[in-house]
Amino acid sequence: MAFHQPWSPLAASGGLTEAGAKDPDGLANALFGRFLNHCGAHIADESLPFPGVIDALKELKAAGAKLVVCTNKPADLSISLQTKLSMVALFDGVVGIDAVTAAKPNAAHLIEAVESVGSDLARTVMVGDADTDAGVARAAATPLILVDFGYTETPAAELAPDVLIQHFDDLVDACTAIFN
């Protein structure tokens, strides 16, 4: 299945065509490659885990939760960031845009992420911070926990999560409340 990937040079080639570039697709691919190399080399330069997230993930994992990252970024960039932040062992899998048939907010992305770790969509909760996270949860008919911090142009409260948390110290209780 072909689809436009948010992390794709195709997004830039139209602008390069308008600017009169020779071989806009080739130039977009080359620039995109440089961009990914730069991201990979500097992925954790100024990144830190949000306060409370490590403890919350450890507690969820100890309780038997399967944790999988569902990201519209290439999986290798996400794994690299997690490795550099000493978080990679907390997750059972990482499913990036390069490993699915459709990107978030399409339900297929979350469904394929859950299946990749041998879990059950009926026992899934999506935790996120943006409209794509809200969209994929709704499309897959799974409960949604959003944080009111992070990256999003639309305030998380306006995305109508099942639970809105202000700190990762609240994540375990939010998950427990959803499944009880």
Image (tube, rainbow, N blue to C red):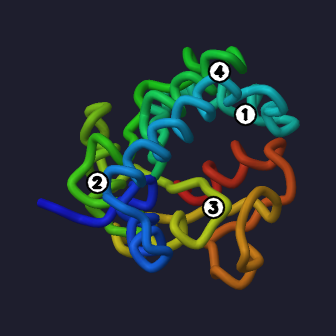
Across and down, in percent, residue 60 comes to 61, 32
Q: State whether residue 114 is above or below residue 143.
A: above
Mark 3 vs 2, N-terminal side: 2
User: What residue is shown with label 3?
Assistant: 145
Which of the 4 quarters of the picture holds residue 63? top right
Point 43% across, 40% down: residue: 74
User: What residue is shown with label 4?
Assistant: 87
Residue at mark 3 to residue at mark 1: CA–CA distance: 14 Å
Q: State whether residue 163 is above or below residue 39.
A: below
Callout count: 4
Mark 4 vs 3, N-terminal side: 4
Mark 4 vs 2, N-terminal side: 4
Q: Amino acid under label 1?
A: Ala
User: What residue is shown with label 1?
Assistant: 56
Mark 2 surroundings within 10 Å by alpha-carbon count, few (fewer than 14), some (14 through 19), many (20 or more): many
Mark 1 surroundings within 10 Å by alpha-carbon count, few (fewer than 14), some (14 through 19), many (20 or more): some
